Amino acid sequence: MGNIMEIILAIAPPLLILLTGGLCRKNGWLRVEADASLSVLTVRVLYPCFFFFHLVGNEDTLSVGNFAFVILAGFICIGAGFGCAYSVAKIMGIEAKVIPPFTFCSGIFNYGFFAFPVAASIFGEQIIAKIILFNLGVETAIWTLGVWILASNQFRFSRLVNPPIISIILAVLVREIGGEEIVPSFAWEIISMLGGCAIPIGLLLIGGNFADLIMKFRLSDGKKVEISAILVRLVLVPLLMFCYALFAPMPVEMNWLKDILIVQIAMPAGIFAIVIVKNYKGDTETAMRVILSTMIGCLFSTPIWLFMGLKFLR
């Protein structure tokens, strides 16, 4: 019973903020025209501050001996998701032209805005710095394997050089040469305040975009895309990651990686994936169907996977 209440209390706040974003969109308080500027502000300013604050200010990150292993784990999770999604698409007979966006969107979980508050609620704020390192591997997989899936001729390593990645590298360097003590107190306060805005604003934006998706949503022929997306993102990939966390040998000092996996396996497809699909001129209708079907499905699957993870992986 304790686990069930813990799960409800963990997922309720971000879900309510998502709902608030949807209601703001419906009432015209969060207009579509504002999305682009708010997204840029979040990705280029707020998110980097959030990363920097938690990596530099979290004492627990000093004990992360082999963060290369954590980054690799994030990369492998996304790579496995892409492989699973592609295989299911072939088996289900999904039309060839929509397989790339289906594979891309089904293979990516919501590794940031939704995962951070849920993880912090269950495991405490100290887990955030470790998820950031894990997500470095996720980002690398998205901008390498993911872009290759969508448009192999447009792949560029320069995509990996972006404000969030730069902030992570800078934070690691600051940690090495002195940590929080070398950052002026007024600068630290500014970084803290800006970073604290990242998740709420990100969730409001996702809620607004989710409301837009619902208004435009049309089922695919035979519902193959929706059924396949739910099968991949909410059943098969979580099951693979669950088995990895349960059976794979893991150093005792890195047991916290299981805590990260507990949260990540429970996440739906990441809504930001539709922006990347659109950027590479992919089929946004397919992306929308994947994201919306998994977002709705996660209302049932997320509590189940969190319960399973807390019961069997800890």
Image: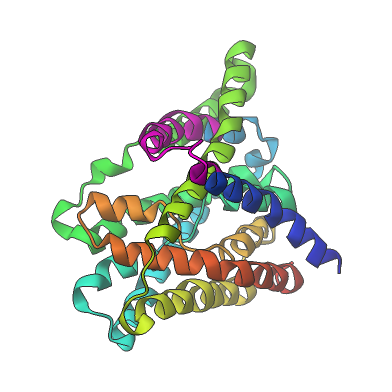
Tell me if I can see residue 96 in this picture.
yes
Residue at coordinates 45% horizontally, 60% vertically from top-left? 214
Q: Which quadrant of the rendered structure holds the N terminus?
A: bottom right
For the rendered model, the colour scheme is rainbow
**Chief secondary structure of the magenta portion:** helix
Q: Is 26 left, or right, of 254 in this rendering?
A: left
- Give residue 180's position: percent from left, percent from top: 63, 23
* Residue 36 sits inside the magenta stretch: yes
Q: Position of residue 239 (x, y in %)?
A: 55, 77
Residue 270's spot in the image, x, y percent?
A: 45, 57
Q: Is residue 214 above or below residue 85?
A: above
- Identify the residue at horizontal 59%, vertical 63% (top origin): 261
Q: Quadrant of the C terminus?
A: bottom right
Q: Which residues are magenta?
A: 24-50
Residue located farthest toward the front when viewing the structure as drawn: 27
Q: Is residue 13 above or below residue 233?
A: above
Q: Is 153 or 64 nearer to us in this picture?
A: 153
Residue in the picture at 50% in, 46% down: 26
Location of residue 206 with respect to 243 vertically, above or below: above
Q: Residue furthest left?
A: 153
Spot occupied by residue 256 in the image (x, y as percentages of width and height): 67, 56
The image quadrant of residue 50 is top right
Where residue 291 sits, quadrant-wise, is bottom left
Report the side of 7 relative to 292 (left or right): right
Closest to the observer, 68 or 169: 169
Q: Quadrant of residue 178?
A: top right
